[in-house]
Amino acid sequence: MNDARSTDVVVIGGGQAGLAAGFHLTRAGADFEILDASHGPGGAWPHTWPSLRLFSPADYSSLPGRRMPRTDGGNPDASHVVEYLRGYEEYYGLPVRREVPVAAVERGDPDGFVVHAVDGRRWRARAVISATGTWSRPFVPTCPGIAAFRGEQIHSAAYRGPEPFGGRRVVVVGGANSGAQIAADLAGHLEESHGELTWCTTEPPRYLPDHVDGRELFRVASASVRSGSSGGVAELGDIVVVPPVRAARDAGLLAATPMFTRFHPDGVEWDDGRRERVDAVIWCTGFRPALGHLRGLGLPRVGGRVVAEGPAVPDVPGLFLLGYGDWCGAASATLIGVGQWAKAAVTAALARGSGAR
């Protein structure tokens, strides 16, 4: 391993979670590097649809140490977040190596890790913080007849706005925030262009109260952490009523229908035999954690999820999962929520010492 770079901590992923970890590592005076597969800053945010808005104003959407600049005209959009993350990285001088996708992490000698990049470069570290997020692993459920469907299918990860769908018959699948926001984004455009929108959800949409935004979600999530409650944000509802969703809902353009049960070549069919011709289906069905680089560590799982206590993986000392969802830290997948978990991960990572050299 003489050709491997040695450091205290390797952070895998340069999005919001990786940068939050970098902030705390910098404050601690640690030797570390952030390896990011993307060619530019912003994590998943450069890949979202233009109308996407944060759940909260800028003042309540910041990473630790540096406030997000305020915006005019409502909550920040994705481009504002990208510029904020770019400036955050530059302000703190975080050592982000771009276009370095990580192929594998393996245990090193005596008790650290070896991180292997796709291009053959290697790093040795006492601790690894994996912060690769979920955007690169969009999930589409299986459905009878899906292979025979002749229309277009995309995941929300590939949605870039309503224009390509003008005049078409579009089904949006998913009853959470992305489904509601994309259905709202399409609704007026399809109505004006004489298209048709069908919004399919497995359960009736659960809107949060209109006054609830990311500030309240973070407060509830934080309270559940302090109390050890298993409830929290999920008990409030599934959909934050951001202004475009509220406008479409109040105009009667967001009428959800039960999920169809199968495809046929030209459309979809419900269990009562009703059929509908469809030109395109947009799957707003979420993502899975991008953890393929950790496959060789044999991570313990329950119900498909890695067993974690906050960001720590107890069975693999020195490995931390940051920002993947509530199962590795309540609100850890949000800008405002990831900071406390980044601090916890960094504190525990550095407590292992810096003897990787």
Image (cartoon, helix red, strand yellow):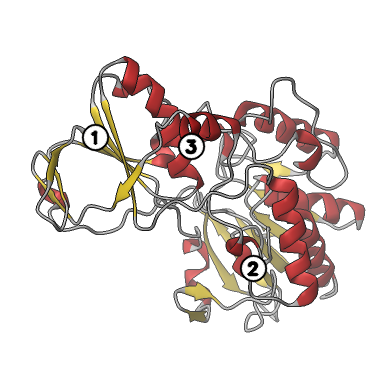
Residue 306 or 263: which is nearer the viewer?
263
In terms of sequence position, does the residue under pointer 2 or pointer 1 come before the other? 1
Label 3 neighbour load within 10 Å: few <14, some 14-19, many 20+: many
Q: Is residue 91 left or right of residue 165?
A: right
| Location of residue 338 in the rendering, given as x and y in whole percent from the top left corner | 73, 55
| Residue 6 appears in the picture as rendered | no
Q: Which residue is mark 1?
A: 280
In terms of sequence position, does the residue under pointer 1 or pointer 3 come before the other? 3
Q: Which mark is residue 328?
A: 2
| Location of residue 155 in the rendering, given as x and y in whole percent from the top left corner | 36, 42
| Residue 194 appears in the picture as rendered | yes
| Location of residue 88 in the rendering, given as x and y in whole percent from the top left corner | 79, 36
Q: Which mark is residue 181?
A: 3
204 is higher (above) or lower (below) than 107: above
Q: Secondary structure at mark 3?
A: helix
Q: Amino acid at mark 2?
A: Cys
Which one is closest to the eye, mark 2 or mark 3? 3
